[in-house]
Amino acid sequence: MCTILLAIFCLPMFANNITVGTPTLTDENSNEGFVNVNFNLTWDNSWRLSSGASNWDAAWVFVKYRVSGGDWLPAHLNNTGHTAGTGTAAAIAVGLLDDNAAFNASINPGMGAFVYRSSAGSGTFTNTDIKLRWNYNADGITNNNISVEVKVFAIEMVRVLEGAFNVGGGNTDNLAFTSTTISTADATTAPSGTGSLGGEAGGYPTGQMAPDSASWPNGYNAFYCMKYEVTQQQYVDFLNTLTQTQADARKANESTYRYAITGSEVGSYATTNPNVACNYLNWPDGAAYTDWSGLRPMTELEFEKACRGPQAAVVGEYAWGTADVAGSAYTLSDAGASNEGIATNYSTTAGNAIYNQSLSTIGAPVRVGIFAAHGSNSGRVSAGASYWGIMELSGNLYERSVTIDNETGRAFTGTHGDGVLASNGNADAATWPGTDSVGAGFRGGAWDAGASTMQVSDRIYANESGSERFYIGGFRAVRR
């Protein structure tokens, strides 16, 4: 019989609107080699809809551990035995390393779990005593009296439901796709006939080359998308769990345009703008964060579905579904605080977004979710939200996506990150575009870009590689 001494030295983990309480390890079963990671979880503005989009938001929760002060590693979870805790009626769904294969504690473990409302409702999600079962024996922890430290991380996500959608129909300029209805999950199905949402119907856009694999994520299947762009606090939490060599490779040496991440050693990284979208992220940075968190990059077809949903395209539309965008310059209130807001020129009729006509003296990205938090927000348009309730897909920082318009991009198969980076700090997930970023591009516009680049169908930079750290570059990840 093996008993492990489970010592916890951990502060709560924070991200925008989401808090994980200090975890404890309970209910150890030394015969079967598992223990429960027990924690509290809360976030604001949670929902599950029973009509309309009929979707929900969730927290993607994952665990890191280290033994006797060593390197931080992913704690691999069981596929059953979890408890959603007490408070909001909730469910737990485990995300395997490969969701297309059967669970195996050693070679196909749980990389994390989605925690979400199990019935319709909205408001603050608050649960105590959530338990995730960690198979510590499968992670090689077998010795007696081992000192183990754990951290629990949570990222707000939004469920994008399975089904047909349109690409390209909202714009005929800036390299937009030819309007096509994506009507099947088989990404190699050639477009033909007449699609229900415009153009032909098939697994990829008319006029494009077919992806290499039928499993290329073309957006038809359901997936989760990060509700917000990666924040500076999320990126700080990431840096503080790497080796020093990895962190040195992944931290930008910048201090402009509200990038406020400081520190030079693992454990010392911090930011004074924790809720501001993290800029100066190049493709290798974003891919590494995504690999570390057990997520994956989105494709540009998934980007359009995340914006538009299953609705017919609107010419010139932005992520909020109309072609109207606020054009007066904003000013900020409580800049840098958790409640950073729009002080002036918030529009109640046109979509709100940060781009080159709304900057004024801001001149940089802002707090994620800033428009939805405004007291005059009346719904999707004023919040600048997508059909599904995803924030800032138009404006603030560019989204990075895998393009279908490139041989390397077409080789992508949607593999998930395994929670571990290469020793040099790079993502090492199979089929992802590499550190040269060939196969990836930019979508959705940014704070110093023009309005047209924020349009859902705009693809002017969709196949633009480049691995420089741009002050307008952010990241957002997805998961099946």
Image (cartoon, rainbow, N blue to C red):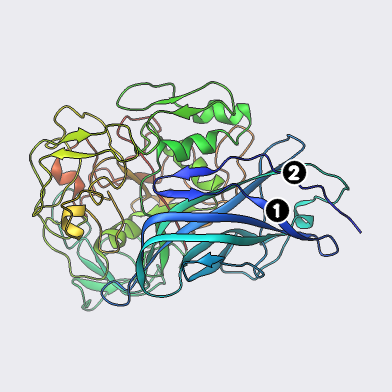
Residue closer to the observer: 279 or 188: 279
| Picture layout, residue 346 above or below residue 285 | below
Residue 448: quadrant of the picture: top left
Residue 403, given in percent of the width and then of the height, sits at 36, 51
Foreground of the two, 126 or 402: 126
Amino acid under label 2? Ala
For residue 442, side relative to residue 439 (left or right):
left
Q: Is residue 134 left or right of residue 371?
A: right
Number of numbered discs overlaid on the protein picture:
2
Residue found at x 12% / y 59%: 322
Question: Which disc, if any, is residue 175?
Answer: none
Look at the numbered disc 1 and give the secondary structure of its residue: strand
Residues under numbered marks 1 and 2 in contact, where contact means CB atoms less than 8 Å apart: no
Is residue 267 shown above or below 286?
A: above
Residue under numbered circle 2: 7
Picture layout, residue 170 above or below residue 240: below
**Disc 1 packing (10 Å; few <14; some 14–19; many ≥20):** many
Dot 1 corresponds to which residue? 25
Say which amino acid is labelled 1. Leu
Q: Nearer the viewer, residue 387 or 168?
A: 387
Q: Is residue 23 visible?
A: yes
Query: What residue do we see at 54% from left, 21% from top?
Result: 264
Q: In the shown orientation, is residue 244 left or right of residue 327? A: right
Residue at 57% over, 69% down? 100
Q: CA distance from mark 1 to mark 2?
A: 8 Å
- Hey, which quadrant is residue 399 in on the image? top left
Quarter of image, res 112: bottom right
Q: Earlier in the sequence, mark 1 or mark 2?
A: 2
